[in-house]
């Protein structure tokens, strides 16, 4: 298990008032059909922050795949994109040890106190990197959030490893700093 994820699980009772197992019991007693419904419930009814709520819901699903399985499944048939994903993780890792990587079925959320980035293999040839950069103007490269909707404010399309350049890392760092 990812060290940051394990730390989050260990800190859950102190930060949320309940252990992961206690949260799982609460969620399993409700008839949620969508991930977002359960996250909203935890945030609105229990005051859980988005990062913890998302992690609790992800880890409480029946037959839950491990975080590594979730990521590996995202890149089945898209193996050429995995080096781009790995380079993004390395770039983000230098920002600080408070980054929590939360894999879901189709994407990976990068969370500090709030989500600041979302990595999604969108097609067989492209990763969409969603960023939370409120009040940042749209450019040809730093596009409107598109399919990410309100989860992110911007999207950058990455087709090769060279797309992870100084400009992109600067945007990632800015998003990370705003998520404190």
Image: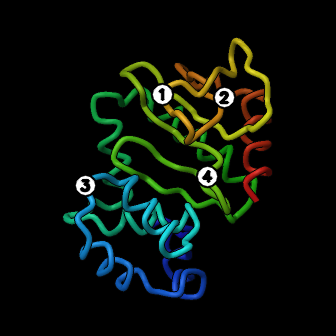
Q: Tell me: 10 left or right of 99.
A: left
How far apart are labels 2 and 4 at the CA level? 20 Å
Figure check: 140 above or below 179: above
At a point 69% along the width and 22% down the height, the residue shown is: 142
Q: How many neighbours does mark 2 have within 10 angstroms: few (below 14), some (14-19), or many (20 or more)? A: some
Q: Nearer the viewer, mark 2 or mark 1?
A: 1
Element under disc 3: loop
Q: Tell me: 157 left or right of 171.
A: left
How far apart are labels 1 and 3 at the CA level? 21 Å
Query: Which of the two discs, 3 and 2, labels the residue nearer the N terminus?
Result: 3
Tell whether label 3 touches label 4 (CB within 8 Å). Answer: no
Query: Which of the two discs, 2 and 1, labels the residue nearer the N terminus?
Result: 1
How far apart are labels 2 and 1 at the CA level? 21 Å
At a point 65% along the width and 34% down the height, the residue shown is: 153
Tell whether label 3 touches label 1 (CB within 8 Å). Answer: no
At a point 26% along the width and 70% down the height, the residue shown is: 30
How far apart are labels 4 and 3 at the CA level? 23 Å
How far apart are labels 3 and 2 at the CA level? 36 Å
Which residue is under mark 4?
A: 115
Which residue is under mark 2?
A: 164
* Residue 162: image location, x then y, percent: 64, 22
Tell whether label 1 touches label 4 (CB within 8 Å). Answer: no
Quarter of the image for residue 79 reads top left
Query: Which of the two discs, 4 and 1, labels the residue nearer the N terminus?
Result: 4
Residue that sits furthest to the front in the current view: 45
Q: Nearer the viewer, mark 3 or mark 2?
A: 3
Which residue is under mark 1?
A: 147
Figure check: 20 above or below 82: below
Q: How many neighbours does mark 4 have within 10 angstroms: few (below 14), some (14-19), or many (20 or more)? A: many
Number of marks in the rendered image: 4
Query: Which of the two discs, 2 and 4, labels the residue nearer the N terminus?
Result: 4
Element under disc 2: loop
């Amino acid at each position: 298990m990812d060290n940051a994820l394990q730390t989050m699980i260990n800190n859950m009772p102190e930060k949320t008032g309940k252990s992961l197992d206690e949260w799982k019991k609460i969620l399993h007693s409700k008839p949620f059909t969508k991930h977002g419904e359960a996250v909203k419930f935890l945030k609105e009814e229990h005051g859980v922050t988005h990062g913890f709520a998302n992690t609790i819901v992800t880890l409480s699903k029946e037959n839950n795949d491990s975080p590594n399985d979730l990521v590996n499944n995202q890149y089945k048939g898209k193996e050429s994109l995995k080096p781009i994903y790995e380079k993004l993780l390395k770039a983000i890792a230098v920002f600080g040890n408070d980054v929590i990587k939360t894999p879901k079925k189709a994407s990976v959320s990068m969370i500090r106190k709030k989500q600041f980035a979302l990595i999604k293999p969108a097609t067989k040839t492209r990763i969409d990197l969603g960023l939370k950069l409120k009040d940042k103007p749209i450019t040809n490269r730093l596009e409107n959030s598109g399919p990410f909707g309100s989860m992110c404010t911007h999207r950058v399309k990455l087709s090769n490893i060279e797309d992870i350049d100084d400009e992109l890392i600067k945007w990632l760092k800015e998003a990370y700093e705003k998520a404190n």
